[in-house]
Image (cartoon, rainbow, N blue to C red):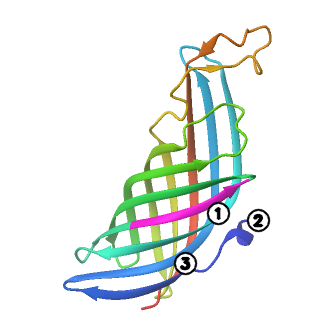
Amino acid sequence: MLLGHLTCSAQTRGDVGDKTFEFGIYGGFIHGQGKTKIKGTDTSMEDSTNSGFIGVGVNTKISDHFYIEPFVQYAIWEEDSFLFIPVHAKYYFGENFNVFVGPQVALGFVKDEEIPMDNFGLDASMGIGYDFLQNFFVSVRYCHQLTNRTPEPVALNEFLDGVPSFIKFDLESKVNTFHIAVGYRFM
């Protein structure tokens, strides 16, 4: 299944002054793990799903080992779509390995919500990458959601038997994601 979700990446390199930038497209596999918890209790609901994604981005060289990489990634999970917008500070060590970290905006466009959720999320994103065969690369990234996707109290009478609909609960909902990407750069 993983191979079915991997796509090639094409990148274009250019120079602006001392800065080198690479524009590209890429794709891969994404796993999402969602958890909603009633605040102040041990009661929670969890769900997970897998999908593929495509994306575009710009990798800008700041120094010999340091890059800044903003990009946009689009994924569809079942009937819902998500847009991820990370900005990574990337450090190359050795010739081919890199580590990266940065914030990520996660926008969810959910059609049918059992629990109303905020479309906006902010994540902490981190990962590792490896460049090989001069033009190819792979990366693995984990994103931990920092914001609560259900900031308003919610009625849970559909989920909890005997609870009237006028009783509202404070919830904490987060979606953490794991991404595997593969790509190609034109040098």
Tell me the tag on residue 64. none
Determine the residue positioned at 55% across, 57% down: 83
Determine the residue positioned at 61% across, 14% down: 168
**Most prominent secondary structure in the magenta stretch?**
strand
Q: Which residue corresponds to mark 2?
A: 1
Highlighted magenta segment, given as a residue range: 70-77
The amino acid type found where label 2 is placed reads: Met
Q: Position of residue 52 (x, y in %)?
A: 67, 63
Q: Quadrant of residue 45?
A: top right
The amino acid type found where label 3 is placed reads: Gly
- Near mark 1 (Cα within 10 A), the count class, few <14, some 14-19 or many ≥20, is many
Q: Which residue corresponds to mark 3?
A: 183
Determine the residue positioned at 40% across, 77% down: 96
Tell me the tag on residue 29. 1
Whether label 1 touches label 2, CB < 8 Å: yes
Question: Which of the marked residues, 1 or 2, is nearer the chain's N terminus?
Answer: 2
Q: CA distance from mark 2 to mark 3?
A: 18 Å
The amino acid type found where label 1 is placed reads: Phe
153 sits to left or right of 3: left
